[in-house]
Amino acid sequence: MGAKKISQFPLKNQENNQQFAQEIIANTQKDMGKVALIISILAVLLVAILFFGLNQNVKGLSTQIHQLENLPKQLTTLGSKVNLLEDKVYALENLPQRTKNLIIANTLQEMASKTKYLSTQVQNENQAVKLIQIQQLLKQLQAEIGSAK
């Protein structure tokens, strides 16, 4: 009987080892299932975060594209403003000459008025005619300078 017990003892030990191994495998499978579930939940969260991040980027890009659609209109407006400013600068560049022409034209007008007055004050008819001719020449010169703006 002693021999039978010894031979049975290892069998029980093997059964215990097999049962213990099966429990470990079952527990490991449950634990691996939990790990897989956690990894899949984290993957879904990561995908959701990436989706919302990309969605915000796309919204930002669409806003910038809409702003770029108005760019040709803004460039046209800017071009017309630049042309207007160039015209004003050109007018300012010519301002000293125009001012000078106005002063000369006013001086010629004054001289023409004085020669008209002098033509009425002289007693010699020949001198009066010359003064009237001078007055006409001054008025012609004034008209030429006044039109040469």
Image (cartoon, rainbow, N blue to C red):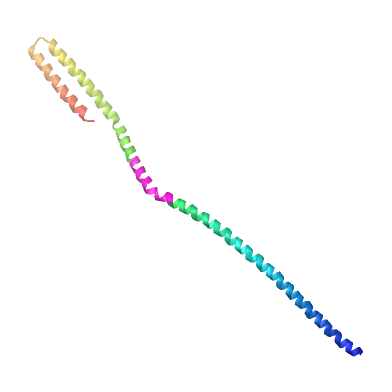
Q: Is residue 40 above or below residue 11?
A: above
Q: Residue at x 13, y 12 (%)?
A: 120
Which of these two is toward me, 32 or 133? 32
- In percent of width and height, residue 84 lies at 32, 38
Above or below, comparing residue 140 to residue 51 in the picture: above
- Name the quadrant of the C terminus: top left
Q: Is residue 18 magenta?
A: no
Quarter of the figure with residue 89:
top left
- Judged left or right of residue 104, residue 121 is left
Residue 65, x across and y down, in percent: 43, 52
Query: Which residue is located at x 35 percent, y 45 percent?
Result: 76
Q: What residue is shown at x 18% (from left), y 15% (from top)?
A: 114
**Residue 68 lies in the magenta stretch:** yes
State the extent of the magenta-drawn residues as a range. 66-81
Question: Which residue lies most toward the right here?
Answer: 2
Prevailing secondary structure class for the magenta stretch in the rendered image: helix
Q: Residue 77: horizontal and vertical position, in percent?
A: 35, 43
Residue 147 rendering spot, x and y as whole percentages: 20, 29
Q: How many numbered discs, if any?
A: 0
Quarter occupied by residue 12:
bottom right
Left or right of 93: which side holds 53? right
Q: Quadrant of the N terminus?
A: bottom right
In the picture shown, does residue 1 fall above or below 33? below
Q: Quadrant of residue 40?
A: bottom right
Residue at x-position 22% and y-position 23%: 105
